[in-house]
Image: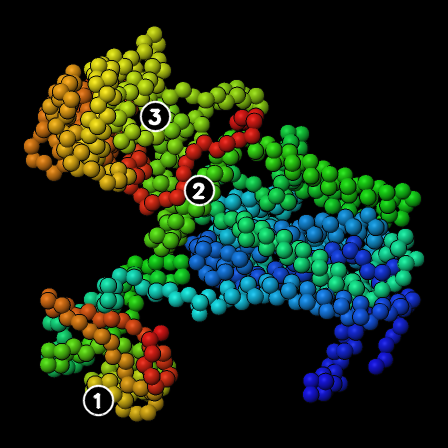
Amino acid sequence: MLAGLSNWLDDRIGHRRLLHDALYEPVPGGARWRYVWGSTLVFVFVTQMITGFFLWTAYSPSTITAWESVYFIQHELSYGWLVRGIHHFAAQAMMILLGLHFLQVVIDGAYRAPREVNFWLGLILMQIVLGLSLTGYLLPWDQKGYYATQVATNIAGVTPGFGPEIQQMAQGGTGYGHHTLTRFFALHAGLLPVLLLVFMTAHIAVFRRHGLHVPHRFLAKPAEMFWPDQVLRDAIACLAVLATILYFAITRGAELSGPADPSEAYSAARPEWYFLFLFRFLKFEAIDAMGLDVGAIYIPGALMGIIALMPIIGRWKLGHRFNVAYTLGLLGGAAYLTVLALSEDKANIDYQAAVAEAHRDGQRAVELAQAEGIPAQGALSLLKQDPFTQGPRIFARACSSCHHYNGHDGTGRIVLVTTGKGHDLVSTPVEPTAADLGNFGSREWMSDILVNYHEVFAPVKNIVDGEQKPGERFLTGDMASWSTDNKEALTKNPEDLKALVEFLAQQGARPDAGEIDAPLALKGQEIFTGGMLKSGDALSSACTDCHTMKLPNAEEFLSENSGSGVPTLEGYGGAIWLRRFIENPGHADFYGENNLMPVFAAKLTPDQLDLLVRWMVGDYIPTKQTIHVPAVASGGGH
Amino acid sequence: MSHESPSSSIPEAPPPRRNFLAAAAAVATGAVVALTPLAAGLAFFLDPLLKRRPSMRGADAEGYLPVANLTELPDDGTPLRFALSADKLDAWNLFRNQTIGTVYLRKLAGQVIAFNDTCPHLGCKVDYKAATQTFFCPCHASSFKLDGERENLIPPRGMDTLEVKVDLENRVWVKYENFQRGVAAKEVI
């Protein structure tokens, strides 16, 4: 039955002949592992066609839907992470296999007559694959892809003669927008794969015409058939490639950094690893001095041109040796530059902090999208309105020149001051001149204010005004003395200290305060107003002797001492207290004339102030992200 | 079957058993490498069948949305069309306060009847014709009586009624659902 059908079909389409021709190609010298590279490339390309098609069914190319649809693929759709992971890592595998295939062709001298044209076809295929990588990198419209591709299109913009025209055609305008994505997508999923198919077909057809290039030393050995000996080796090699791709797709996954934000500097911008050597090459001063067109277009163009001439160079006596040496030299140089770039980045604390921030933004955008859905204007707006994302940035800009935050500037960067000129810049850490606010308003903070006041405010010693050290007034003032006088009594009665801390932590009604132990807080209130500890010891004075205090929702003040330069503790550490304090710390309710902090009412917009305060009191959608100074390899920051 | 000899020497045939094993291994390995990406892709493509996602947010615990006030409905039982408003979920997007559907409400002896105004035939919107006191679908001329029963046999079933509740403030709530079109049974989709 089946045989009958096969006969019927063969009479009409002749598939047996086709199959026979495809499979029963003799391999002179026998099947070998060294011939597998071409087949693995075909396999990876087919894999890209398949996974690419399925990603296409869920991808939406526009500036307000690209990141969003990729997020949905990666985190919501069934097996989306797997399909995207395969596509992502197969693209990288393709670059490696391309390199190996090329290397093998050069070393074996397979570019020589009569295979010159096929060598050139291969080079064209290489350019198409590079084009696919470049266009694909932008499509998720995340910070990483956005800024890396900016570099590429700007390089295109310095092409001699008609650079700006090329750049604007690629971008679909003078800048990036919807049409950059639609154009890149049309190239990535439309034109380039078709070109690749056409040239790959030609490459294989010409390859079949000349057969495998078999190095002389194998020719004496008996020939074998392509099927099944070579096919089996090819299939096993493909399996190894697939296993590697799956390994990375499953253990690492394709990254998605935060949604592209043209208004946010992105100091973690780097191309994909296989373009890192070019990136590092352009950073050499000598190359930079020659101009971007020389470094990014003429020199790489000339190097590529020599590769294209290999079949001709190879005719000369020492030509083949030159070609091999040249290829190994190029690869060695590229490898060196790649390692150089990676090791420099590893030791660069600014870069590491930027990478950590980019990673955090990416994860955070996902958290926000999952928590509240993405509005019509896109996921970027979620990050823009998120206190956890914006608060640290505002703190770094507005506060970190005096205050630190757990030792950093809020975003995980060490606060540095840079001195020197040109290439002799020296960055040194800046000493803070005000309290570290990393735990402001927490129970730990309350406790430290009571018993470690000097430690908390030690940085004010660094304020220098000519001969004067105005900060000293905070370290010799009433609260400083109170802390010294009562430290022993309070630490000897930890339950009382805990009660007092609980009472203070209750005042701010902070979202990050957790559950308040009300009976404990009530005990704390008694100490706060009476100044008597349970053990019978008396504090040097009660808190209400100096501080203004009103309990939440109370009508009457517990104590009123306004205008004395002693901050009110009404709502202490909470959003309202903090906002008023930042707006005008010299207000009579706060430090009054003792104040040394600038007035921020006019320096921050109401929105910025709101984001900053909400971040500091923990009023945001919960996050799994943490902000800290990244660990770096020895060498320190640049 | 004719076969052109290749220009180079014809290789010696390897032992048949070894050849068969190699062929079987090649086919098996080839199948694994080709089918893995395809299988992952197909599983991805089947997502709509694997995961059910809500299409809106904002209904009460039982799935009802407020739609109108009892006083807005005429006492003579004339149907009126009302829009339902809720947060619309569409893949990654959440669109706030969108019209997610429209329904016909009728008040009869104090009771409220709600119809989904989507034609159970092929999903066009059904209109109420005051002149004939019928619901009429402009696409394929499905016609329904005021109580939702079919007037002709074009639609496979009568108009789809929706569950209704009226709260103490006389607000009418509707549990908005859509049903599979083109079949006689009323099945929620």
| Amino acid carrying mark 1 in the image | Thr
Which residue carries the number 3 mark? A436
Q: Which mark is residue A360?
A: 2
Q: Is there a contact, CB below 8 Å, between mark 1 and mark 3? A: no
Q: Which residue is mark 1?
A: B132
Which SS class for mark 2? Answer: helix
Is residue A546 among the parts visible in the rendering? no
Tell me the mark number nearer the camera, choosing from 1 and 3: 3
Quadrant position of residue A548: top left
**Residue furthest bottom as drawn:** B152
Q: Which quarter of the rendered picture does the C terminus of chain A lie within?
A: top right
Q: Residue type at mark 3: give it.
A: Asp
The Cα–Cα distance between marks 3 and 2, rounded to whole angstroms, is: 23 Å
Q: Is residue B74 above or below residue A247?
A: below
Classify mark 1: helix, strand or loop: loop
Label 1 and label 2 in one chain: no
Kind of residue sitting beneath label 2:
Arg
> Residue at point 38% right, 52% down?
A369
Q: A86 left or right of A322? A: left
Task: Compare marks 3 and 2 and give the one earlier in the sequence.
Answer: 2
CA distance for labels 1 and 3:
78 Å
Q: Chain of mark 3?
A: A
Q: Quadrant of the N terminus of chain A?
A: bottom right
Point out residue A288 in the picture as x, y percentages from the top left corner: 63, 32
Establish whether labels 1 and 3 are both on one chain: no
